[in-house]
Image (tube, grey):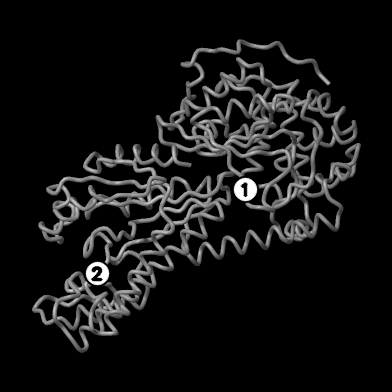
Amino acid sequence: MSAQPARESVAPLRETRRRVPEGGATQRLRILDDLFAQLDAESIRYCHWKSNEHLGPALTGVTDVDALFDRRAAQRLAHILTSSPHFKRFTVKAGRGYPGIEDYVGFDPETGALTHLHVHYQLTLGEKFLKGHRLPWEDVLLETRVRDADYDVWVTDPHLELLILIARAAIKLRWRDGLLELLGYDYVRGSMLREMRWLAARVRSDRLIERSTPLVGSAAAHAAAAMISTRAPSIRQLRAFRRLVDPPLSSYRMYSAPGTARRMLFREWTWIWWRVSHWITRAPTRSTRTPPHGGVAIAFVGPDGAGKSTLTQTIAKWLSREMAVITTYGGSGKGTASPPRRWLQWIGAWSRPSTAVRPPLDRASSPPAAAAKPEAKGGGFRLLGRILWILTLARERRRWAQQVRQARSLGMIVLSDRLPQSQFAGLNDGPRLGSWVDSPSWLRRQAARREQASFRMAELVPPDLVIRLHVPVDIASRRKPETPLDQLRQKVEIVGKLAFPSTCRVAEINAAQPIDRVVAEVKQAVWECL
């Protein structure tokens, strides 16, 4: 084991830290630079221990940051991260996490980017979907770490990083990989091959043998050195390396062989089912990470033309890479109307006597204008259609409330485009049948009561954060010219008067600003609520 290298200055200039080598197209995240500077100042040992071939993208938030930390400093590190407004701890779905690894998500206010910080206290690695091995080499990596000249952060010695990469490739070998090789497929390819070639160009064979021998034995160290002269290690070479390692890599298993196979199969099929189910439901979630304190419901409200739907999708795309997110629609317009309501809208548009061009079959029209005034006279077919439309909408509201409640209880981030409200009737997703509560018609009374019940269910799941979007009438009119001007005025007034429970945080956003500025303010409000 080599002695620790001479320590360089632990407080380099910020300008040096934030320098991006030529070819970098993205700004480095200041929150990561500040974190690494604080770690140096506190003498907390760390190193970015794998995938240093693309360290640049990691420091700009494009890929994850995998840093190994001295476990003896775990409490101080946790204090630094949890006391910072820019980092929040997240937990992964049960059965998807790994021992000795914590997940923190960081938000950089300057760029609006998120970064995922994997906090490693031990080298947990191995098979896909499992990582069932722990290599007890943490102290060696931290004692031999080197300072990256381009990015000014501590990284693993490339000789040890290459050894670990070879060990990871050998551990991941399955019987079916041998069949693929017989069919002409290279086992080491893609990003793994690129990383091996990048590391091979930065190591010396004699130095690799010297660093590897205390960890894997002389025979395995020489086998590893022989691989760097080839285009790509073959499965035969990796199997030979695995046989020669002393002590055997199998001694580092965390589970028995049957337990490993069982867990790998379960996790793989769980992952496949998760991907398929989210593809079917078109959910934006690409992660299972959730806040340890529970889920959060966020609603976007505003008049027509404020950009509610656009912002909902933008924020969902921004969050979904790092945390479990679902989107939902709480309005009464087209949105994500159920198939029955879409058919009723289409039939209503075709049945209205009008000289206007009828909508095509594959488009859902807006709800009939008369639906906002249920007390207006009308009977027979049109009255029945109006009642069915509102009852279908009430059913959607109940499903919306159930979806928000369940997802938030499971720890997910729920983004709702629009929000049911019972304070103002007729507009802005408010009730439409209030005047029918005391109607002599049994059918009308029942319809009104069903609608009221749906609003009561919606009120039982108030959002944790409301993004209230304000926009002047003239700008709203330019963005939504199809909406009558007097209706736009009413909607603008109603949005400003909406009241929310005291437990609900409200962020007032000027939606008339340039979209980049609006998105930045919404991101800040959402991050503070998480």
Q: Which mark is residue 92?
A: 1
Q: Mark 1, mark 2: which one is toward the viewer?
A: 2
Disc 2 secondary structure class: loop
Label 2 sits on what residue type?
Answer: Arg
Residue drawn at the location 17% of the way across and 77% of the way down: 358
Residue 206 picture location, percent across and down = 81, 24
Q: Which of the image's four quarters has the N terminus?
A: top right
Q: As drawn, is 481 to the left or to the right of 267?
A: left
Residue 209 picture location, percent across and down = 83, 27
Return the residue nearer the eye: 19 or 360. Answer: 360
As displayed, is residue 18 above or below residue 331? above
Q: Which mark is residue 432?
A: 2
Return the residue nearer the eye: 39 or 179. Answer: 39
As displayed, is residue 257 above or below residue 16? below
Residue 252 picture location, percent across and down = 85, 42
Label 1 sits on what residue type?
Answer: Val
Residue drawn at the location 41% of the way across and 54% of the way down: 462
